[in-house]
Image (tube, rainbow, N blue to C red):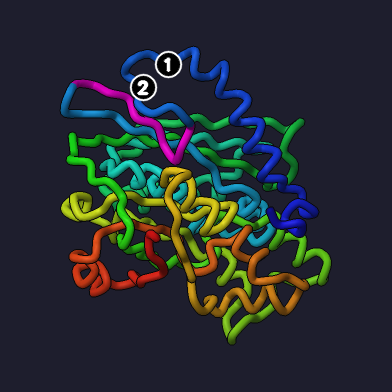
Amino acid sequence: MSKLYKKSGVDVIKTDNLIYQALKFIKTTHNHRVLGNKLGFSAEYKVNKDVTLCSATDGVGTKAILAAELNSYKGIGQDLLAMCSNDLLCNKATPLFFLDYFACNSVIPKQYTEILKSLTKACKKINCSLIGGETAEMPSLYHGNHFDMAGFLVGLKNKQKLEHIKSGDLIIGIKSNGFHSNGYSLIRKIISDNKINLKSAKFNKKKLSDVLMKPTRLYHQLVSTSDFKKIKSLAHITGGGVIANFKRSISKKIKFSIDVGRLPDEYKFIEDNIKISKKELQDVFNCGIGMTIITNKKNYNYFIKKNHFKLIGEIE
């Protein structure tokens, strides 16, 4: 757990512990159709012996605050969908439909339209229908142009043959597209503490704002349904970093080694503005890997030839 992340207001361990305590009464709502015994990346609900419905829900976190401060909304809709769809992908499910929740002080037409256009465009990229949502105006809770977003995605999973994870299996990372939508409480603290003017600041000859607002990658565009039979497990790398999220996709008994390699250029912005170890970086950010898959060695050449795929580890 990163001490810096905790200082910025995010206590991942405390929240995880609360969730596991809450599971005791949450599970009392489950019937025989709910598959699995714990809350994971997404949930499965058995329809019949061959089909399950999968669901995922998420938000964009405090990246929404940066979007409001910069009046930059063209990618935030994709962020919202990707945070849900990438979780859904971990269940090897195909997206069906999406619902969004948008909360604000008072609807600002330009802001609202740009966000929904971004979300619509993203849905089209992964053949997902945006079928509804909720818009809430709450002036006593939100101020100015600040807003929050959440989404709920439902997908379909056909019956698949399970392959057990074995020693020698490979861990392949699929590259991220920047910071995605995690770690922004710490990023915003860095900006505030260093009095960085986001509207004029540059990084690697680019606008810093463009680097920070780059939308989250949609991994359904990189992993096809035909790939599912070659994959034993997937993990969406979000808050908590590579190791913590990867562990959530495997049994506690399984041992592994992972090395994400050289950090992408954007992490120099973090390292230049705050004293932070590589381990702490990996406890907060995706560090260049937004999704991991486990596959056997015979599939190595198939995956490694794909754009954005690289070998990062092995099951011991």
Q: Nearer the viewer, residue 67 or 49?
A: 49
Magenta part mainly helix, strand or loop? Answer: loop
Name the quadrant containing residue 191. bottom right
Q: x, y (%) of residue 23? A: 55, 24
Question: 278 left or right of 299?
Answer: right
The amino acid type of the residue labelled 2 equals Val
Q: x, y (%) of residue 19? A: 60, 31
> What is the quadrant of the C terminus in the image?
bottom left
Relative to residue 180, is residue 53 depicted above or below? above
> In the drawing, what numbered circle is on residue 34?
2
Q: x, y (%) of residue 306? A: 25, 71
Q: Is residue 96 magenta?
A: no
The residue that mark 1 highlights is 30
Relative to residue 281, is residue 9 depicted above or below? above
Q: Nearer the viewer, residue 214 or 44?
A: 44
Residue drawn at point x = 24 percent, y = 36 percent: 157
